[in-house]
Image: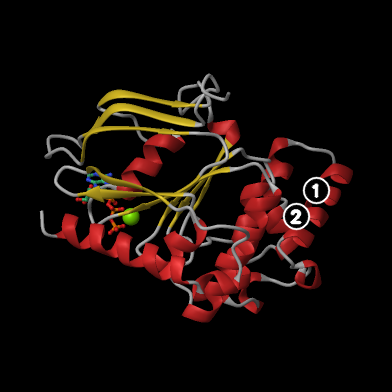
């Protein structure tokens, strides 16, 4: 039925070498359909961040091709949005002004800026701190501001590099639940890098396990958890089974 849909992200025999160094990514091929939530997991240094940068068009491939919604990564920048681990908010601007920064730079009318920012703040549950400054916010709130800012351009492909790594476990669980809720409401394709197996299983429809030296696809695991992802999900047997399965793959690639 959908087999002729253009993949949201398609990698074909992608390799990446920085300068004269050894290959970071070696012959990576993977096709991601629109609407998939794909987590990328693998030992430190296996090229996860590099992979996201290539898809974001921030760094060129050495060989092979990447297509984002049928376009080159550079041409697709309008529909992609990169969310980094460190929220890097501007400290002298309020929450509202941080979220609206991109729109302001794009020259969007003030009225539209305001209505877009209002609805984004409502989406991430931060209306009540719209006029606060970043230093007045908790880590989890800062992250939500940065997600709202990334969403302002209405991206279709979200690239998230360990966005919740710096948060304590409770806040992280809460952010995972928020993200699962936002994802359900929108039609995003997400590439999500994490070191947390539980986080990857909770959020994803699919997990790619990368092996290192050079980075390559070792396992492609479907996460077929039924129903909505809520705090309950973590207490299911199916969840535990998948966490064990992914942890096992991760241990395997760690030994290669
Ligand atoms: N701009 C660069 N120039 C040269 N080498 C780089 C550059 N960026 C990354 N590397 C190297 O590429 C390899 C992969 O790095 P990358 O950041 O993609 O790994 P990662 O899987 O994201 O690791 P981590 O889990 O620690 O974040 C590392 O050996 C790193 O030193
Ligand atoms: Mg990284």
Residue at (60, 60) in percent of width and height: 179
In this view, the residue in front, 165 or 27, is: 27
Residue ID at (60%, 42%): 188
**Residue depicted at x 56% and y 57%:** 226
Q: Closest to the observer: 8 or 46?
A: 8
**Other residues around mark 2 within 10 Å, as few (<14) / some (14–19) / many (≥20):** many
Residue 76 on image: x %, y %? 53, 28
Query: In the image, what residue occupies the spot 53% across and 26% down?
Result: 69
Of residue 252 and residue 42, the one placed in the foreground of this image is 252
Q: Which residue is mark 1?
A: 116
Q: Position of residue 64 (x, y in %)?
A: 28, 23
- Above or below — where is 87 with respect to 234? above
The color scheme shown is secondary structure
Q: Residue furthest front?
A: 237
Ligand 2 visible in quadrant: bottom left
Number of residues whose C-alpha sits closer than 10 Å to that of mark 1, classed few (under 14), some (14–19) or many (20 or more): some
Residue at the far right in the pictured view: 111
**What is the C-alpha distance between the residues marked 1 and 2?**
6 Å
Q: Is residue 75 left or right of residue 45?
A: right
Q: Is residue 210 above or below residue 16?
A: below
Give the residue pinned by disc 2: 120
Distance from mark 2 CB to nearest ligand 2 atom below 8 Å: no
In which quadrant is the N terminus drawn?
top right
Query: Could you tell me which secondary element the residue under label 1 belongs to?
Result: helix
- Note whether residue 121 is visible: yes
Q: At numbered mark 2, what does the secondary structure look like: helix, strand or loop?
A: helix
Percent position (x, y) of residue 211? 20, 49
Where does the image place residue 81, in percent across and percent down from the top left? 55, 43
């Amino acid at each position: 039925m959908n087999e002729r849909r253009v993949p949201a992200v398609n990698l074909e025999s992608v390799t990446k070498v920085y300068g004269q160094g050894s290959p970071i990514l070696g012959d990576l091929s993977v096709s991601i359909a629109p609407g998939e939530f794909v987590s990328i997991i693998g030992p430190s240094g296996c090229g996860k961040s590099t992979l996201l940068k290539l898809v974001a068009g921030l760094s060129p491939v050495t060989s092979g091709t990447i297509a984002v919604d049928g376009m080159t990564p550079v041409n697709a920048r309008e529909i992609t949005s990169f969310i980094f681990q460190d929220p890097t908010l501007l400290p002298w601007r309020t929450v509202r002004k941080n979220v609206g920064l991109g729109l302001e730079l794009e020259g969007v009318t003030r009225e539209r800026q305001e209505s877009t920012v209002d609805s984004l703040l409502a989406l991430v549950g931060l209306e009540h701190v719209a006029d606060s400054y970043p230093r007045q916010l908790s880590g989890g709130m800062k992250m939500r501001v940065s997600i709202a800012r990334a969403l302002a351009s209405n991206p279709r492909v979200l690239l998230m590099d360990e966005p919740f790594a710096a948060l304590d476990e409770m806040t992280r669980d809460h952010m995972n639940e928020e993200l699962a809720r936002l994802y359900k409401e929108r039609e995003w394709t997400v590439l999500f890098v994490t070191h947390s197996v539980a986080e990857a299983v909770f959020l994803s429809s699919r997990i790619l396990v990368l092996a290192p030296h050079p980075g390559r696809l070792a396992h492609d695991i479907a996460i077929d958890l039924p129903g909505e992802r809520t705090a309950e999900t973590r207490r299911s047997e199916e969840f535990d089974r998948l966490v064990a399965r992914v942890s096992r793959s991760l241990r395997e690639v760690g030994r290669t």
